[in-house]
Image (tube, rainbow, N blue to C red):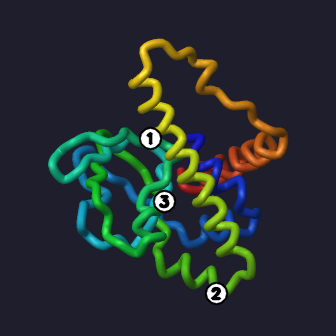
Amino acid sequence: MRKVLHILGDFNDQDIEWLIDVGIKKTIQANDFLIQANTQLQDIYFVLGGRFDIDLPDGTSLAKIKNGEILGEMSFIEEEPPMVNVKATEPAIVISISHEALTDRFKEVSGFEGRFYKAMSLFLSSRLRGIASKISYENTEVKTKKEFEQDIDSATLNRIQIAGERFSRLLNHFS
């Protein structure tokens, strides 16, 4: 769930209300694809519940996703079809936000585009650090957990607390 906190921590309360207003709750059944490689996406997704596998088209497993994650954001940013398949491993619930709604909001609300891209950069940076830590850990014989932990400054802690409250609002609305 930590990943979504990067997004919601940089949004303001009006942005959260907008997500609630335009978001569409979707239920994905086990073994159904949410995203298919090389198929253009029209939405990004906030995972509210369930689990997904992310695999390359050849079946190579890349990641396992659970609630609090965001999917489809890279295709939105790059304006390219996804390179991976995302398949539910159990019944899952997502909030779908259309690309069109996002770009309309960029035009209509001053500052939203900046908040959105800042949040995405923090989210993607966190994802990359996690991957780098995992690779580093796997390639080193002896590493302690403490070596991978980072101090969190008070501003980040405050943003995470606010984001947690906002994610709870989304969960309550779409439950």
Residue at image mark 2: 107
Mark 3 lies on residue? 95
Q: Amino acid at mark 1?
A: Lys
Question: Measured from the top left, where is residue 17 in percent x and y?
Answer: 68, 66
- The numbered mark, 2 or 3, whose residue comes first in the sequence reads 3
Q: Nearer the viewer, residue 133 or 32?
A: 133
Q: Residue at x 57, y 84 (%)?
A: 104
Q: Which residue is mark 1?
A: 66
Q: Secondary structure at mark 3?
A: strand
SS at badge 2: helix
Q: Is residue 114 left or right of residue 79?
A: right
Q: Quadrant of residue 30?
A: top left
Query: Which residue appears at 81% of the width and 44% of the height?
Result: 158
- In the image, residue 157 sits, relative to residue 117, either above or below, namely above
Q: Looking at this view, is 166 or 69 the one in front? A: 69
Q: Residues within 10 Å of mark 2 (few under 14, many from 20)?
A: few
- Which residue is located at x 59 percent, y 41 percent? 2
Nearer to us of marks 1 and 3 is 1
Which comes before the other along the chain, label 1 or label 2? 1
The type of residue carrying mark 2 is Lys
Asked if disc 1 and disc 3 are in contact, CB closer than 8 Å, the reply is no
Q: How would you rate the neighbour count of disc 3 (Cα within 10 Å): few for under 14, some for 14-19, many for 20 or more?
A: many
Residue 162's x, y, as percent?
76, 48
Query: In 3D space, how far apart are the residues under numbered discs 1 and 2 (Cα atoms)?
Result: 32 Å
Measured Cα–Cα span from mark 2 to mark 3: 22 Å
